[in-house]
Image: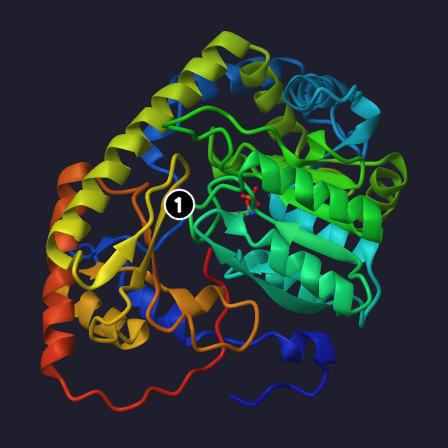
Amino acid sequence: MTVPPHLSTRARAVRSSEIRDLLRLAERPDVISLAGGLPDPSGFPLDDIRSAADAAVSESSRSLQYTSTEGDKELRELLAQRHTAATGRHTTADDVVITTGSQQGLDLLARALADPGDVALVENPTYLGALQALRAAGIDTAGIPVDADGLDIAMLASRLDMVPAPRLVYTVPTFANPTGTTLPDERRRGLARLADHHGFLVIEDAPYADLRFRGSAVAPVATYSDRVISLGTVSKTLAPGLRVGWLIGPRPVVDAVVRLKQAVDLHTSGLSQRIVVHLLARTDWFDAHVATLAARYGERCCALRSAVDARLGDRLAITDPDGGMFLWATPRPGAAPIDARELLTLAIDAGTAFVPGDAFAAESTTHLAGSMRLSFATASSEELATAAERLANAVGQLDGRSRPKMSRGPLSHVR
Ligand SMILES: Cc1ncc(COP(=O)(O)O)c(C=O)c1O
């Protein structure tokens, strides 16, 4: 069907995705998918959510009535306390806005902080939803390379010495999507220093930070500069269906975001916010719940990593994350090349799926063509071992094929 002429230029510019179509095939019940960034549904604390929902419904004037755009005061206070504890910066409810998932925080920030044509620097590869939000606001995105420790701060610094400073730097510094890397403390301080020196704002997006299954916590980048805006969410710790996220930042940013949000949805679901209040207020329960979840992800990470390594270790280098939901596999130098998109079609036939790395490219590039994001969050350890076996079979088939060059179409809508 041709595009109706009454659609806006912006709507027409939103591109469809061949990857999304391919991954739809991966929804077949026989496919063990490593593609989705979805939390394990068996980790949703159903009984606790049920009692929290009961409690929320009984306070109907707070949970079911219209509420303030910035969000429930008690929830903002709880989040401010957590932020103060994590960063050592005194934070109050007035520094917090509740958003409809952190995705809405990204969209509002992109529109509040930059004008069309302004530049945002992002990790390359990075979270696609951030690229979509920035680009929808007309912001030009440019990629900064990442290595095993996340954003390459030296590369960022040398770029800043050559070209005018960007408006924004967007980063997922802890257990990144898609690479799983974590920025060490020294680089966090370096990023904060650069922000202070060059005058840009940093968006620190940390949806996975609580899901640590190894090592000790690293201080948020927000610890080191007041030019940092922190994004958080309950999507990975409680349930994404609640659609409760938040943004913590300087007062003028918070005020601008609230003004924009009024026009978008008036406020985030009051019922969801009150459910989250009842769960987060039980601090010991919440921390124990997250620890259990993280331990489960840790086991699964280990199961998938060792199974892929045992079968494909000579072909693929696989990251070894301390938390989060993702492994990142890249072709070993000198090994036969892998076209990850072509491999995906074979993998789906073999009964597994992953997201090809170039789906997360911040700019047109070929260096991600052989990379893959493998999620260990949703399948059991046994299923993950089977998925690794299927992936290895698909690589075997790929090797047996003559490989015509694939066209690289646009990518979007992968979480
Ligand atoms: C890095 C990153 N930021 C933000 C989001 C959006 O999460 P939410 O469910 O809070 O909107 C995701 C979801 O996968 C993500 O991976």
- Residue in the picture at 90% in, 40% down: 252
The quarter of the picture where residue 322 lies is top left
Q: Is residue 380 left or right of residue 205?
A: left
| Label 1: which secondary element | loop
Above-or-below relation of 202 to 74: below
On the question of residue 262 being in view, the answer is no
Spot occupied by residue 186 in the image (x, y as percentages of width and height): 60, 37
Spot occupied by residue 67 in the image (x, y as percentages of width and height): 78, 29
Packing grade of label 1 (10 A; few <14, some 14-19, many >=20) is some
- Residue in the picture at 60% in, 18% down: 56
- In-front residue for pair 213/71: 213
Above-or-below relation of 138 to 225: below
Q: Is residue 150 left or right of residue 355?
A: right
Residue linked to disc 1: 38
On the question of residue 5 being in view, the answer is yes
Tag count in the figure? 1
Spot occupied by residue 83 in the image (x, y as percentages of width and height): 68, 23
Q: Is residue 76 left or right of residue 395?
A: right
User: Does mark 1's beta carbon lie closer than 8 Å to ligand 1?
Assistant: no
Q: Is residue 342 left or right of residue 54?
A: left
Above-or-below relation of 311 to 20: above
Spot occupied by residue 282 in the image (x, y as percentages of width and height): 54, 10
- Residue in the picture at 15% in, 69% down: 395
Q: Label 1 is placed on what type of residue?
A: Leu
The quarter of the picture where residue 91 lies is top right
Color scheme of the displayed model: rainbow
- Residue in the picture at 39% in, 45% down: 38
- In-front residue for pair 10/333: 333
